[in-house]
Amino acid sequence: MKVRIIGAGLAGVEAAYYLAKKGYDIDLYEMRPKKMTPAHQTDKFAELVCSNSLRSDSLENACGILKKEMELLNSLVIDVARKHSVSAGGALAVDREGYSTEVTRRIKEFSNIHIKNEEVTNLDSAIPTIIASGPLTTDALCEEIKKLFDADDFYFFDAQAPIIAASSIDFTKVYLKSRYDKGIPSYYNCPMTKDEFDRFYQALITAEEVEVKDFEVKVFEGCMPIEIMAKRGPQTLTFGPMKPVGLMKPDGTKPYAVVQLRQDDAAKEMYNLVGFQTHLKFGEQKRVFQMIPGLENAVFVKYGRMHKNTYINAPKILKPSFQTKKYPNLFFAGQISGVEGYVESAASGIYAAINMDRYLTGREQIIFPASTVIGSMSHYICNANPEGFQPMNANFGIMAPLDFPHKKKERKGLYAKRALEIMQKEIEQL
């Protein structure tokens, strides 16, 4: 039986991998390199266009639990990420090139996955299809989705952080440490005094941004440009991406603010500015970010930039199985479905593929309970208020609450224990 999958990003490759192993004949559509997006740089599958981090690996974090759930579901993305991981403290970060190269190779090894390097502009509701075209879905496909689902315009703006050359960092002014000394020291920390922070802050909030034409700029709270965040007040930085808590200097003193640099490649030749996604003009990025101690002579391998992302209004369109309410053959997965983040997108690809298989074999669709992280994601996006709906990262706040109150640290451990025990039982029913 043939299934179409549109998009070879994180969700698309997970869906293709799951269904190919089930014996389906897969047409995997990926328009790159014939047509590129504003953010992608290569033609490889599952390319990470923003950060190289898949976030926390701790079971005290919802994203860490989600990774474990995905491993129980034999996730391709997490398996390859672990093989190409780079040092990132308590987070799972990868060498982008090695990671996407192996994902591409492993997908192309399947004889029943047929790669179609072409843009999809029309959807046939009679053909089983998983739409995993991602946040950079083309205008033509967006129009087709709007037409099929009577949907209004759907988008928000996303931003990327700049990447600098390691050779241009002044290592006499930075120190190697992970927050609270968790894991191996993995981040270079650029400490600031209050005077240094105040000068940097004023330069940041007065710097010139790239003008966005023709669109109302709707920014997703989870990936807000640093300059927009700063305009809400200096404490949005010192309690946010520049918080110094848990990052004492080698001499035992606490800096007023800290900018963290995270390894971006296996060779340790490039580092990205953590939390510094931006839409400043390139010249302004260089001027302002070179005010950071240790980055006075920073060489920018890649400047930060903003791009338009798209997503559907999931509460109106999707069932919790990621199947559409209107057309049983059509499923959505990935960021276009309303989940947010690399790991969440990949997880939704597995979820959609499981239910596509069950739908095509005449079985009842599986709805993972909200006591699991993967289940809480689909429950949230399908039950949120459709007015002003925005994508959501995995977090404890959208999971089913525990039966009775616990202390905070104990509560996180119990969330993990409960989720993984339930997921194991769910898998036994697949």
Image (tube, rainbow, N blue to C red):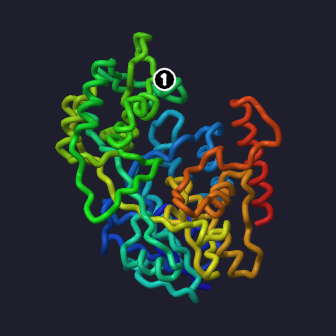
The residue closer to the viewer here, 418 or 220, is: 220
Res. 44 in view: yes
Percent across and percent down for residue 238 are 42, 28
> What secondary structure is found at the residue carrying circle 1?
loop
Q: Which quadrant is home to the C terminus?
A: bottom right
Count every numbered label the image shows and give the total: 1
- Asked whether, in this view, residue 365 is left or right of residue 70, the answer is right
Q: Which quadrant is home to the N terminus?
A: bottom right
Bin the neighbour count of mark 1 within 10 Å (Cα to Cα): few under 14, some 14-19, many 20 and up.
some
Q: Specify the amino acid type for callout 1.
A: Val
Residue shown at 74% from the left, 29% from the top: 407
Residue shown at 64% from the left, 81% from the top: 328
Residue shown at 46% from the left, 48% from the top: 221
Percent across and percent down for residue 346 are 55, 59
Residue shown at 55% from the left, 79% from the top: 129
Percent across and percent down for residue 152 are 47, 72
- Asked whether, in this view, residue 5 is left or right of residue 381, the answer is left
Q: Given the current orientation, which residue lies at the most extreme front position? A: 387
The residue closer to the viewer here, 305 or 269, is: 305
Q: Is residue 7 above or below residue 176?
A: below
Q: In the picture, residue 164 is in which quadrant?
A: top left
Q: Is residue 82 above or below residue 388?
A: above
Q: In the picture, residue 86 is in which quadrant?
A: top left
The residue closer to the viewer here, 375 or 210, is: 210
Q: Given the current orientation, which residue lies at the most extreme right position? A: 403
Percent across and percent down for residue 396 are 65, 44
Res. 172 in view: no
Q: In the picture, residue 166 is in which quadrant?
A: top left
The residue closer to the viewer here, 162 or 117, is: 162
According to the picture, the residue beneath numbered tag 1 turns out to be 245
